[in-house]
Image: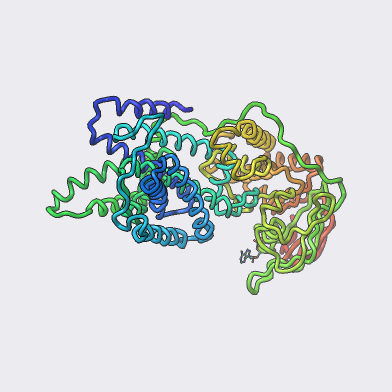
Amino acid sequence: MNRSLALFIIVLAAVPFLPTPEFWITLFNYIGLYSIVALGLVLLTGVAGLTSFGQAAFVGLGAYSTAYLSTQFGLSPWIGLLAGIVITAGAAFFIGAITMRLSGHFLPLGTIAWGLSLFFLFGNLEFLGKYDGLNGIPPITVFGHSLESGRQMYLLIWLVVVLAVIAVQNLLNSRPGRAIRALRGGGVMAESMGVNTAWMKIVIFVLAALLASVSGWLYAHLQRAVNPTPFGLNAGIEYLFMAVVGGAGYVWGAILGATILTLLKDQLQSILPRLLGANGNFEVIVFGVLMVLLLQRAREGIWPFLRRLLPQKPNVLAPSSAPALSTRARHTTGEVVLQVIRARKEFGGLVAVNDLEFEVRAGEIMGLIGPNGAGKSTMFNLVTGVLPVTSGEIRFRSGGTLERIDNLPSRQIVRRGIARTFQHVRLMPTMSVLENVAIGAHLRGTHGDISGIATSVLRLNRTEESSLLFEAKRQLERVGLGHLLYEEAGSLALGQQRILEIARALCCDPNLLLLDEPAAGLRYKEKQALAELLTKLKGEGISVLLVEHDMDFVMNLTDRLVVMEFGTKIAEGLPSAVQQNPAVLEAYLGGID
Ligand code: ADP
Ligand code: MG
């Protein structure tokens, strides 16, 4: 546990035992309740990039579940908690499966839609007391102590906050957490590393809803009454405000945002009506102005400014040794690994890849060259499942046979041993170099998505984590970036970012490596080091398919070349022969130097 968290806990625990006025206890209780919901939004919105205005509805599900069961059937609040969790998980799974598919602003609009629906549902159901709600909710009992007063509830509420902070931090600094953080990158990179992004979005949506639901449970037993008002769209917007104001990308941002907005609201509600001489929710206007200012001046929220005052240290450290991960069997040198059969890709009327045919053999470095726009990157996207072929077949050797892969999604293709880098680097700029590369090792962890999350939250994943991080460090050292493990990836020079992508691809333990312009932006020495590395990989039986414009680099390194122009193969063969080919010289206008 880190020192700031320990200090935070000590200060918190002291509050109810000091002569703190009741008023402040109440305020703190609300800050705690809001923090739990905002923490869910940090995961969902700040980390995974999925905006939701509807979290208040899940608070309502948690609150109404326990309220109904405890008032109508006299069941224990603890059973109410369980029921709330089960009901919320079910509802969130259902809603998430529908809304998480929406993209752009349709997603937030979708969350508004179901947020409103649940709100009206609470208000219209007879057995939930319609808009009057349910009264006479019993207090929570812990080890025979009944938590009747706000002061007694305080400790439970903040215990939940602290546990939620620890759980979310544990999750984020682990294999599933890295996969979740990679969602922000838009999905192509994460899928290429084996992450099932659609499923991960639903899982994260359910987790955020569960945090909201637990907050609702605490709320119901603190208030001892529920009605629909606090679970409407207004509240949903305020929760999002809290996360964004505090810093939606940071665990502590949630608590900071909940604190600031709760205190501010309390002050404004007493000051503004006096100032304006009229009653009304004027604080909403101030919040709106605050939000606009923030979006212009500090998109990351307020926490990053405070964080700068604290000592910086890496989220995760690579161990100096760890049990090795298992590796896949290499192919026998010389056998066909990749077979491209009349592969075609059309974008509207444009034929980007025109019935292309070639093969890559085990332990060979094959170059794919051609002028800009020839279709090389598109070819990579076809092989890795980023784009579907218009027609034709692509086969890859796995388990002894050449298996068709052109109908598989990216994450299934990387699972079979094809890893890639991107021409336009795709990495998570605020994550450390080490963590970025560890995303590549995603498929080498053994847990499923759900059990992976559970073990990470409970920190039962230490052995696997150290193996994954050790592998990431090993690959970084291998490509010559071992001295930059804890730098932010975005701070690296572009050439280094490309090399980082190679290390990430190597973490996939590939049999075929696709490199899209890896030497662009490298200095002479760095290019030499890259050439050495690729030769070494070849020696290990890994095949490489290389797109590169630096002709010296290509001619010295590759075993064979395929030359493309306007989507069509115009030449194939040994580099020395291709270099003399008139069609190739023609395509390159003035020849290859
Ligand atoms: P290269 O990598 O050889 O420079 P690309 O594969 O990037 O070439 O592009 C080949 C052609 O396909 C270009 O004309 C490009 O504009 C077009 N193209 C590539 N991707 C897309 C896309 N997603 N939608 C439409 N056209 C595309
Ligand atoms: Mg390209």
What percent of the width, then of the height, locates residue 47?
49, 46
Q: Residue furthest bottom?
A: 349
Q: Quadrant of ligand 2?
A: bottom right
What percent of the width, then of the height, locates residue 143?
41, 29
Residue at image position (71%, 64%) is 589
Q: Residue furthest front?
A: 73
What percent of the width, then of the height, locates residue 441?
66, 41
Whether residue 349 is visible here, answered yes or no, is yes
Residue at image position (80%, 56%) is 403
Q: Is residue 1 left or right of residue 305?
A: right
Image quarter of residue 573: bottom right
Q: Is residue 19 above or below residue 73?
A: above
What percent of the width, then of the height, locates residue 350?
66, 71
Give the image's coloring scheme: rainbow
Which quarter of the rendered picture does the C terminus lie within? bottom right
Q: Is residue 304 left or right of residue 522?
A: left
Residue at image position (57%, 37%) is 456
Image quarter of residue 278: bottom left
Q: Is residue 398 left or right of residue 8?
A: right
Near-viewer residue (200 or 438): 200
Near-viewer residue (92 or 482): 92
Q: Is residue 228 left or right of residue 50?
A: left
Residue at image position (71%, 66%) is 353
Near-viewer residue (97 or 536): 97
Whether residue 297 is visible here, answered yes or no, is no
Q: Is residue 249 above or below residue 109?
A: above
Q: How many marks?
A: 0
